[in-house]
Amino acid sequence: MKILVIGSGGREHALVWRLRQSPEVEKIWCAPGNGGTTAVDEISAEDDAACASVNVGDVDSLVALAERLKPDLTVVGPEGPLVAGIRDKFECRKLRLVGPSRRDARLEGSKIFAKEFMSRYRIPTPTLYGTFESAGEAIRALDAVDWPVVVKADGLCAGKGVLVAETREEAAAFIRCLLEKHALGQGGSRILLETALKGEELSFIVLTDGRSCLPMAPTRDHKRVFDGDLGPNTGGMGAYTVDGMIPPEIASIIMDKIVRPTIAGLSEEGLPYKGFLYFGLMLTADGPQVLEYNCRLGDPETQPLMMRMNFDLAVALDAVASRKLAGFKTAWKPGASACVVMTSAGYPGPFETGEKIEGLSEANALPDVTVFQAGTRREGDSIVTSGGRVLGVTAMGGDLEQAVCNAYAAVDKIHFAGAHYRKDIGAKGIARSRAAGELPRG
Ligand code: GLY
């Protein structure tokens, strides 16, 4: 198989890394890719240049690239091209693609569409107070809510569209920012207010062909920029997956009450969903509830998932594209994997780029470690920073503590000016395992 992976983050590097290990895969392109995704021996300089210059915001240019490269399969990482209808355009031209249709991608592209969908299929989700286009009306509605309250932009806002507001002042300021100052553009031109839930968040991702459904190992993300879950939200500062992360009875409830009704509802209303579907869940005392859908794999959740994956991803994706996933079996390497994201100084605010990264080979030489690149580019023989999230330093271990320890040992080998990372990735999970007697106290 020849496979085209679309995107340029750590998620896409991890996908390319896993797919490259499949005996079924002859060639992989990643467009636009990053400093870590290109295997220079695999593709020609012309194809490399065509991939690197593509704009993921321009679906027509992605169609033109696929018509030139003629991949057997295209896999889309980020939500932008999916929400813009890349699957529909590819299928019109008989190009096989793993990813949802434009309509189904609205589950991520419009939080209000997702809320209405969940209401139609009785999928558990926080109570909706209302949807608003006028700041005045939204602020008046705050008189009738319980605190804290969640204010959420309807459209895509690169992770900046949600606030859990503790006070009326905080909520009103965010509402004005979105609906009067248009700080997040079109994505924030409609909002919704919903109840805030207490519990633990979980990223539950499945791969589906619209009929059968393969759950990936559950993962946990760390969204805030600083240790102790402080500071602004980011795309994700680290993630992990570990055997036994959720009890089997919770996994069954998630599948029966959330995943299957979602996939059945989508098939009933439109085209069969083909691709990864991400359920951002809150595990509450009353059971799991859906905070958000994403129409793709998570980043950085994909990095630890790809490390533990013990089945042929290329074969699974091919089966999804042909809608022949029934009977496919997943398998996960025992133990745990963890990813620590290293960022440029200042992220998620403004940051400098072009800093030389040292120590990548030393880190990658450590046992059970792979450094996935994200905001990087090649400059001669060097790799330099080119984005906010720069690297996803990822490691396996026999348990979560070992995986995290291996990942931080690799982080210690890597240096670039202003590098920032959280020091507490997986800390809550390790504390929970210690409390449950699964790890020695120490
Ligand atoms: N890590 C969260 C996301 O991919 O949206």
Image (tube, grey):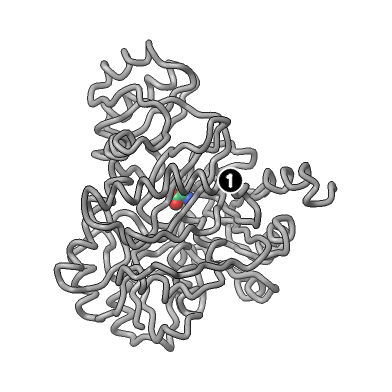
Relative horizontal placement of residue 199, taking residue 380 as reference (left or right): right
* Quarter of the picture holding the N terminus: bottom left
Find residue 329 and report its horizontal and vertical position in percent: 50, 69
Residue nearest the observer in this picture, 342 or 26: 26
Looking at the rendered structure, the secondary structure element under dot 1 is: helix
Instruction: Check disc 1 and report the residue beneath it.
Output: 249
Residue 151, x across and y down, in percent: 38, 28
Instruction: Determine crowd level at label 1: few under 14, some 14-19, many 20+ residues with C-alpha closer than 10 A.
Output: few
Residue pictured at 84% horizontal, 47% vertical:
441
Residue at 26 percent of width and 72 percent of height: 96
Q: In which quarter of the image is residue 411?
A: bottom right
Determine whether 259 is above or below 365 in the image.
Answer: above
Depth check: give the residue in front, 394 or 302.
302
User: Can see residue 388?
Assistant: yes
Position in image of residue 60 (x %, y %): 17, 65
**Residue 353 sits above or below residue 28 on the image:** above
Q: Nearer the viewer, residue 101 or 235?
A: 101
Viewed as shown, does residue 190 lie left or right of 393? left
Residue 180 in sight here: no
